[in-house]
Image (tube, rainbow, N blue to C red):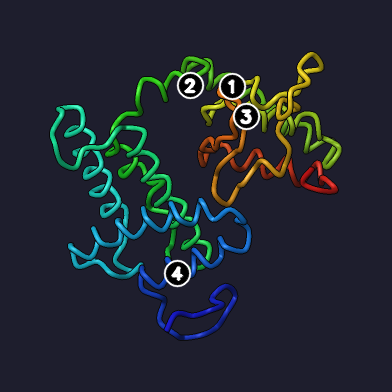
Amino acid sequence: MPNPNPQGSTTTEDPPTLQEGLTQFLEAKAKGDDSGNYRRNAKRVITRWINWLEQRDIESFEQLDETVLAHYAEHLRRRVAANEAEATDGGIARSTAWTYYNTISAFLRWASKWGYLQENYARSGLAQESMPDRSTTQQSQQQFWTPDQREQILNYVNKRAHDAIDEKGLDAEIEARDRALVAVLAFTGVRGSEIFRSEHDNRTGRQGIRWRDVDLEEQTISVLGKNQQRQSAWLLEQAIPAVERYRTISDPPSDD
């Protein structure tokens, strides 16, 4: 039986199987996801991944490591290659491959927090390097600066925020905010017009993102896209510390 409350527990019970862990993961998400869309999609993707692992005699968290995740990434790469070669079976788009991989990563991130894994192996260099390159569309959306430009601006806002926090502590809100905004732009596919408020644009949803639009657990941001529909953008791992730190410093009275 899986441990119902493993965090901080001294129980000697065995950790859950991957399938049992998925059940716990979905139950945890049910508490904060009213629509159920994320749970349904996550259940479908993670169940397929667990089935893929079972074919390789892997059924527990203890059997996972970065090599296993690298092999799964290579599996996704082959499916992308099949799609681009116009093969009839098993092909998927690059964007779909990354959606699958990020969903698995969210599951492993949850598992590592509960002590089932030492770390999120999906974030290892070996595993990520085995993934197919992102699509041209994804790259153009995600890369607003050249790699050198992005590194320079990130280094600048990081140093500025660190110095301000050392000097002013919780009063370093502006510097922490700027660092969080740069991190969001650098490590998501969102555009500035989707996250900034404009006094000249009074359309519903164009008033800037609020904390209720940010889900750090699922690593997503909800924005109003070009088609005037709400959509989720992936918030990569690199951006999360800056966003979390800004939330701590700003201490918003509510998610609105």
Residue type at mark 4 is Thr
Q: Earlier in the sequence, mark 3 or mark 4?
A: 4
User: Can you give x and y, in whole percent of width and height, for residue 41 in the image?
Assistant: 43, 51
- Mark 1 is surrounded, within 10 Å at the Cα level, by few (under 14), some (14 to 19) or many (20 or more) other residues, namely some
Q: Which residue is mark 1?
A: 191
Badge 1 element: loop
- In the figure, 248 relative to 114: above or below? above
Labels in figure, total: 4
Q: Nearer the viewer, mark 3 or mark 2?
A: 3
| Residue 224, label in figure | 3
Quarter of the figure that contains the N terminus = bottom left
Residue in view at x 53 percent, y 67 percent: 27
Structural distance between the alpha carbons of marks 2 and 1: 8 Å
Q: Position of residue 169 (x, y in %)?
A: 82, 41
Query: Of callouts 3 and 2, which one flags the residue occurring earlier in the amino acid sequence?
Result: 2
The answer to whether the residues at label 3 and label 4 have Cβ atoms under 8 Å apart is no
The residue positioned 85% from the left and 48% from the top of the image is: 253
Which label was assigned to residue 141? 2
Tell me which amino acid carries mark 1.
Arg
